[in-house]
Image (tube, rainbow, N blue to C red):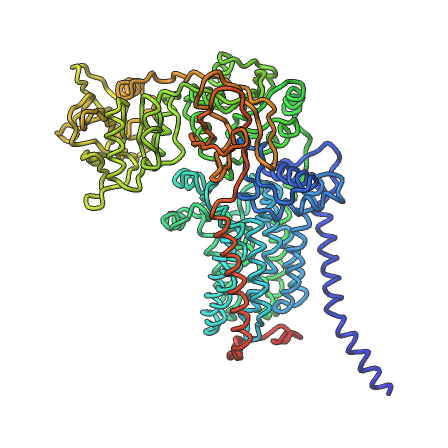
Amino acid sequence: METMMNTVRNRQVEAFKPIGWWLGGALGLLAGALWFYAPVLFAPAGTYPWAPDTLGHVLKATYLAESVAQGVWYPDLFPGWYMGLQMLRYYPPAAYYLIAALAQVAPNMLVATNWLMVGALLVGACGWLLYRRWLGMGWALVGGALYLILPDNVRVAFADGNVPRVVAIALLPWLLFAVLRALEPDGRARHLFIIAVGMALTVLSHAMMAAIYAAMLALLSLAWVMAFSGGMRRALRVIAALVIGIMLSGWWLFPSLTGGITDIDTTAMTEALAVVPIAHYFDPRVRLSDIETMTVGAFLLMGALMLLLWRRRQSPAALALVSVGFVGILLSTPRVNTFYNALPMHSLLWPARFLGIASTFVLFGVLWYLRDVPWRGRWRVVPVVLLLLVCAEFMLGRRLVFMRPLSPDLEAVVSNLAQTPGWRVATLDHSALGSKTSYWFAVQGREQVFGWAYQGATTARTVAALNEALQTGFIPYVLSRLDVYGVDDVVVLKRLPTVNDVMRGLQGHGFQRLYDGEEIALYHRDGEPRAFVVEWQGLGIGRGAQNAAYIFPSIVMGTSPYLDDYTLDELTRYPLLVLSGFQWHDKQRAEALVRDVARAGVRVVIDLTGTPPDPMASIPHFLDVWGEPVVLDERPVPVNLATGETMTLSPFGTHDGEKSILWYTHTPQGLSGDVATTSYIGEKATLVGYKDVDGGRVWFVGYNLFFYTLARGDVDAIHLLEEATGLTAHALPVVHPVPLQAYKAGTFGYRFTYTLETPQTLFVPIAAHDRWALTLDDAPSAYQSYERLLVMDAPAGTHQVALRFQPPPIYTVGRLVSLAGVVFLFVLLWYVRRTPAERPLWPTWYPMPEGVQVSS
């Protein structure tokens, strides 16, 4: 009997050992987190996150919490940002609900956000304790501790302030564990279930990171198969589970894929993404000089490379992990990045964001290698020295963990805003001030027009145009848009290259300087919510037409780039129609529209740059006018005018050191007459000309003259465009404000009342989402969209207007995809349960960790 009791007691002790290890490991990691992140967890009152993104996420979480308090659990609209933002359509909701929940017990939203970020990193670190299965408890604990302070994780959390990404970081180790378990011979259906659910949660935390995780985990699954020479069926199951997980989040994901960041110019976005030389990653000194630099850890990479090349005892698991990790790292290096940028949808998966999961794979592979290699004799010092160097380098990240008080300049601006009446504020800073301006200005009740992180807004391209106009010095365009967007307060960063022009323009445009600090200045004019009757002189259609609007601010941009999306009435509403970079659904219908517009007396100006090429000739072709290719170098271009005068345009191409940067463009051929020509390889080339069509005249501009003028600011080129358009450069449109009385904005939409003496086309600076329901005195009414803002034909008199959001068809598509994901998940789990086990994945020569069994 005593022997039996001892046996039972011993079994109970053995059963509780894993729980003890878990608790001990988790408590150790908790203690490490409390010490490492103490500067933010126990920050004094009056200090705030310094990272550029953090307060913007706090602002969204604050708005969500306020909406929930009013009984709205999933608000459709956030009117305080970018003239109306569908916040939860474009920003994954998980992080904001977590912050709002933590705020119920935290002193305030800022503290709740810090708790979430540190807690998320701790949850991710605890996930490493699961790797005890392969590494043993000691190495798993080391991995968790290093993951807690992994350079990319710390940078994302406290240098970028990207709270949604931090939530995704918390999920990664758990997701990776489920993937590796599913790849083993005794992997169960539950592991695939965890993969699918974990991937869905990752999408709802950060969609881009979910796509990156899916790609890297799929690649790891295939590498695992090659490393162990078997298990392809299991790898395909893992990939299927990853895809199903993305499908499960379809109810949110599919609506988010229209507009927002997908509407930003992909070429411009690609050029803005970071590319890092490979030597940078292997240089341990870079983090000493730049604490915010992107890094994986130079000693970690050198150790991984050393262990990979050491072939006396090579681990296939470590080989797979480190190899795939290096692939992720190399995507952000120049040569590999050039190839990557040629892939479709590359602009939606930023190479630098692969570093987090790549770092995790490399770290896991190195620890697996260190655990697997029998270090004997003098070689026993190798893992100790390597780990000490890695730890020392990772500890440098603590310099990023701090809070700081509000700057005196920003504090003064916020104080002035609190004491002055106004509707909207624009921050002209090239996003250099980060999200803190958005947060503090919203606290004062100001709606935001322009500032930080506009890529999630319907008006993303509209506000991005303000940035480009600032950078290129076309200040009159900026002033005109500040008018029609309802801006009463302008905050100017004084280190902008064009700051003197901006300040002079604001002071001459009815703004008063209320504050002039060391870093920023505040300009103000009293105002209230208002719409506008604007005397636009032209309509621009197509992405290239935006360049014309910079030069001629009286041109209003159409929202759709497709010419045949517009009616003849819309195209003849203004005296001028500019088409550049435009598209069409039906070319014959588009050409017929242009003929009708020209016959109606509207001046039509076409730049064939960026239009769909002829399928046979592969060059632009419209209205029987061809765009013949032209390549220009850094020599000036002499121009002959039809009047007999001559002028010389500054070089189109440029010279960068020993390298010539050529200008690839075209000249229109097949015209009826020329206004400005030049000589190109001995032949006449047209810069400005016209084509007579059916009793009307259509003007054509060659040499990509609109963009050239924007880039070079050539005065003679401006004169040529004035000749073509009939407009005066830099002339602002005449604006007549119409007060919006009883203006209300909230999660429900908008309500206001206006009064007009005569019927007018009313320009309302509210984002035109894809399914607004507009009512005029409770009766449904139509609207149009220009510059992605609302335009309505408003009758005379006093009328009440209401705007409510109606879900577009893409919402239904997303829900159906999620439903299909549920069905496919059950089918996958049913199939796995019915499929007999395969042969063991582990080769007989490969040693398993001591005390760890292959079966669960």
Q: Position of residue 52 (x, y in %)?
A: 58, 36
Question: Is residue 727 visible in the rendered structure shown here?
Answer: yes
Q: Is residue 289 above or below residue 493?
A: below
Query: The N terminus appears in which quarter of the rendering?
Result: bottom right
Q: Is residue 745 above or below residue 100?
A: above
Q: Where is residue 116 in the image (x, y as percent from the top left)?
A: 68, 47
Instruction: Report the front residue among 106 and 670.
Output: 670
Instruction: Report the front residue among 10 and 66.
Output: 66
Give the residue furthest to the right: 2
* Residue 754 image-quadrant placement: top right
Q: In this view, does 792 lie above or below 371?
A: above
Question: Is residue 490 visible in the rendered structure shown here?
Answer: no
- Residue occupying image coordinates x 56% and y 24%: 753
Query: The C terminus appears in which quarter of the rendering?
Result: bottom right
Instruction: Report the front residue among 190 and 166.
Output: 190
Give the residue furthest to the bottom: 1
Q: In this view, does 753 lie above or below 64?
A: above
Instruction: Report the front residue among 362 and 8.
Output: 8
Q: Where is residue 855 in the image (x, y as percent from the top left)?
A: 62, 76
Q: In this view, does 713 lie to the left or right of 405?
A: left
* Residue 27 image-quadrant placement: bottom right
* Residue 423 image-quadrant placement: top right
Q: Where is residue 145 in the image (x, y as percent from the top left)?
A: 66, 55
Q: Is residue 250 left or right of residue 63?
A: left
- Residue occupying image coordinates x 48% and y 59%: 324
Q: How many numbered badges does the structure rendering display? A: 0
